Image (spheres, rainbow, N blue to C red):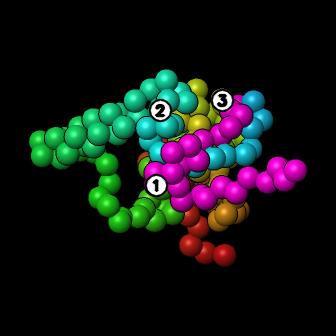
């Protein structure tokens, strides 16, 4: 007997519609690593939520906020430079340089764990040695070193 299952990663595992989400079979928080593709409707059924309605409402809300000039998201296709990210998340950078744990930084800075992890990865990628802390006009700031 052949127990092989073929999964098309572009289609919903359950209904065959185009994939919109990847769902952990076993929750990631419980050690799950394997994922299956699901459409929004089937993913919502798994979680007991209406993801289709949620997405529609979210997009409508963003559209309305843009029309009112209240949308705070960055413009599509724009990117922050490394220096801009460090300046924007200076509080996170300082806590990382002070060797605080990720959970401590989340509590101290009120930033999401995902944001803190991204800043930590950025610092690892550019190397903490390229960052210097100094006191400028009575307040602490962080600046990328321009000299070697």
Q: Say what secondary structure mark 3 lies in.
A: helix
View extreme (bottom): residue: 148
Residue lying at 59% horizontally and 37% vertically, measured from the top left: 113
In front of the other: 49 or 123 = 49
Q: Residue furthest front?
A: 1
Kindly report the distance in space between the C-alpha atoms of the residues bearing marks 2 and 3. 33 Å
Label annotation for residue 18: 1
- SS at mark 1 in the image: loop
Q: Is 79 situated above or below 20?
A: below
Q: In this view, does 39 lie to the left or right of 148?
A: left
Is residue 78 highlighted in magenta? no
What residue is shown at x 84% (from left), y 53% (from top)?
2
Could you tell me which secondary element the residue under label 2 belongs to?
helix
| Numbered circles on residues, count | 3
Q: Where does label 2 land, which residue?
A: 44
Residue 77 in the image, given as x and y percentages of width and height: 35, 66
Give residue 104's position: percent from left, percent from top. 66, 29
Residue 121 picture location, percent across and down: 65, 55
- Asked whether residue 133 appears in the rendered view, the answer is yes
Q: Where is residue 81 in the image (x, y as percent from the top left)?
A: 46, 65
- Name the residue that disc number 3 marks: 104
Q: Distance between the residues labelled 2 and 1?
A: 15 Å
Of the image marks 1 and 3, the number of the one nearer the N terminus: 1
Residue at 63% in and 47% down = 36
């Amino acid at each position: 007997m052949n127990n092989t299952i073929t999964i098309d990663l572009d289609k919903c595992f359950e209904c065959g519609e185009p994939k919109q989400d990847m769902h952990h079979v076993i929750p990631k928080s419980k050690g799950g690593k394997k994922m299956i593709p699901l459409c929004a409707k089937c993913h919502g059924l798994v979680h007991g939520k209406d993801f289709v309605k949620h997405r529609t409402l979210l997009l409508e809300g963003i559209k309305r906020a843009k029309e009112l000039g209240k949308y705070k998201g960055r413009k599509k296709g724009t990117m922050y430079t490394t220096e801009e990210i460090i300046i924007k998340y200076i509080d996170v950078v300082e806590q990382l340089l002070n060797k605080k744990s990720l959970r401590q930084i989340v509590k101290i800075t009120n930033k999401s764990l995902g944001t803190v992890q991204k800043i930590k990865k950025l610092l690892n990628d550019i190397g903490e040695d390229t960052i210097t802390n100094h006191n400028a006009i009575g307040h602490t700031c962080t600046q990328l070193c321009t000299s070697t």
